[in-house]
Amino acid sequence: MFREINGAVEASSLKELKHRKVKQLTCVIIVFLLSRLLYYYVGIRFDVTPLAHFWQYIDVNLLSTNLLQSLYYLHSQPPLFNLFLGISLKFFANHLVMAFHLSYLLLGLIFTISLYLLMTKLGVSYSLSTILTILFIISPACILYENWLFYTYPIAVSLSLSAFFLHKFLVTQTAKDGFIFFTLLSLIALTMSMFHILWFSLFVLILLFYERHNWKKIAFACCIPFALIFLLYLKNLHVFGIFTNSSWFGMNFSRITILNLPEQERVSLVCQGKISELSLIPPFSNFVDYPLNWSGIKKTNIPVLDQEIKTGGDTNFNNIIYINISKQYLKDAFYTLLFQPKTYIKGLMIAYWNYFRPSSKYLFLMDNRKHIQDMDRFYNLVFFGQILNNDTPTLRKDGTIQYDTHKFLNMGLFLVIGYPILAFYGFLLTLKAFSGNPIDSPFALTILFIGINILYITLVSNSFELHENNRLRFIIDPFFLLLLSLFINNGVKKFKQHAD
């Protein structure tokens, strides 16, 4: 009899908790929808200008008329986002802005739901999950990236959603959830070059190690997504002689190494034959800026490889010449790294300074940001700790101390302090979870997934990239939010235990 009563009480409690969870999630969704209407009212509009001008995109005319061939011969980027652009141009040419806007709104809704559900599944209270999810989804940074035609927002959504499905797979142990998890990872790797095939492979190996009893389902779930990534690398090796997902690595890496050398030193090294004459030219320069022996390559009769200037008037950096140019920049960059390491350290300092700036302070978000300056300022001051709201280059002339102080106060000081603490807290959570007996596999491996991605993106984005660092950090801001939710939730629990 007592068992029946206890069972009824438990069932009633579970039903009440489920009802509360749905109620809170409904509240979060309503706030998401209302916030988008309000932001639209104050002037936020979906920005499609990147379509015609961004280096990463194939020429608009080729996307419309020669999509498949252009994607096959795309060496500068993984092809998936350009495929999305091409399909949108073919099917929604007359309503392009609306199609893109609705696509990103749908991504935003998925983002909202996945963040909330993942917090609750990791043990965070419904109330705290609701508050933190709302604070994130209405933030200026989230709004600005959601209204900008670039792959930063889709990658952030996909990464958060993949963490959700990883946890779900570890709970349900079904091949379907595992397949969705690995498919999301492959979509990320086929969209953004920073996510290497080794990044994907690492999570396959981790799951195979910790879930050895389930190795058949893991192998089945990952084989097709892995094959898609591997085929891209194999195609690039066969066609271009590069086993990678992007030919731009050398040009990107040179910006944090060679370009930090004073011009006189570069000239001296070129005269000594230690680096090439390309080091005197900024990477991603136009054809006319390069010597004839670099720019005068025989035509291939493939438009996406031969085109010099795109329809919008911008350089086509997928032109065949940039493969060899990038390789040479890479050789010069490695020389600088080995024999001028102080130059690289200087580049790292600039990269990390930019990394800890609020992610809304990104150049290409300026047009929309001006409509929400007060909201942006409030968020950056209260939640990120950005004391100053501008960066005045003229302070370089006024003295090093003033300029360095100004740069420091333009960083998000709460980010500088809080993110390393949260990363360390995530490490402690992982250790604790894996030391349990039995191991709480869903929690432990999900936190490990979050921690590895935080470490990976932080190191890769700042070690090989300059100027894009705060934009790249936005991709993992949701993961820091998840760690913050656990930090607060566990802290409140301990406080209540001590109080009792």
Image (cartoon, rainbow, N blue to C red):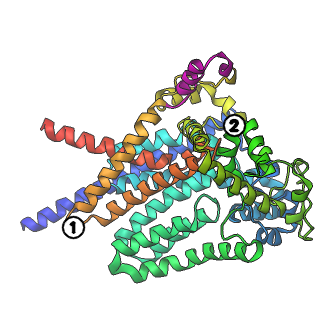
Q: Furthest-front residue in view?
A: 272
Residue 402 on the magenta segment: yes
Q: Position of residue 285 (x, y in %)?
A: 82, 47
How many dots with numbers? 2
Q: Give residue 1's quadrant in the image.
A: bottom left
Q: Which residues are magenta?
A: 395-412
* In the image: residue 102, left or right of residue 59: left
Circle 2 residues within 10 Å: few <14, some 14–19, many ≥20: few
For numbered disc 1, what is the local secondary structure?
A: loop
Looking at the image, is 289 positioned above or below residue 375?
Answer: below
Front-most of residues 199 and 214: 199
Question: Which residue is identified by label 1?
Answer: 438
Front-most of residues 178 and 104: 178
Looking at the image, is 173 positioned above or below residue 93?
Answer: below
Q: Position of residue 261 (x, y in %)?
A: 68, 39
Q: Specify the quadrant that holds the C terminus.
A: top left
Residue 258 visible in the current orientation: yes
Q: Which mark is residue 48?
A: none
Q: Give residue 485's quadrant in the image.
A: top left
Q: Which mark is residue 363?
A: 2
Q: What residue is drawn where x is 37% and y is 41%?
A: 421
Q: From the image, give the main secondary structure of the stretch colored magenta.
A: helix
What is the CA distance from the residue labelled 1 to the residue labelled 2?
49 Å
* Mark before the other along the chain sequence, 1 or 2: 2
Residue 151 on the magenta segment: no
Q: What residue is drawn where x is 54% and y is 22%?
A: 405
Instruction: Identify the amino acid type marked 1.
Output: Pro
* In the image: residue 314, left or right of residue 371: right
Q: Position of residue 369 (x, y in %)?
A: 66, 33
For numbered disc 2, what is the local secondary structure?
A: helix
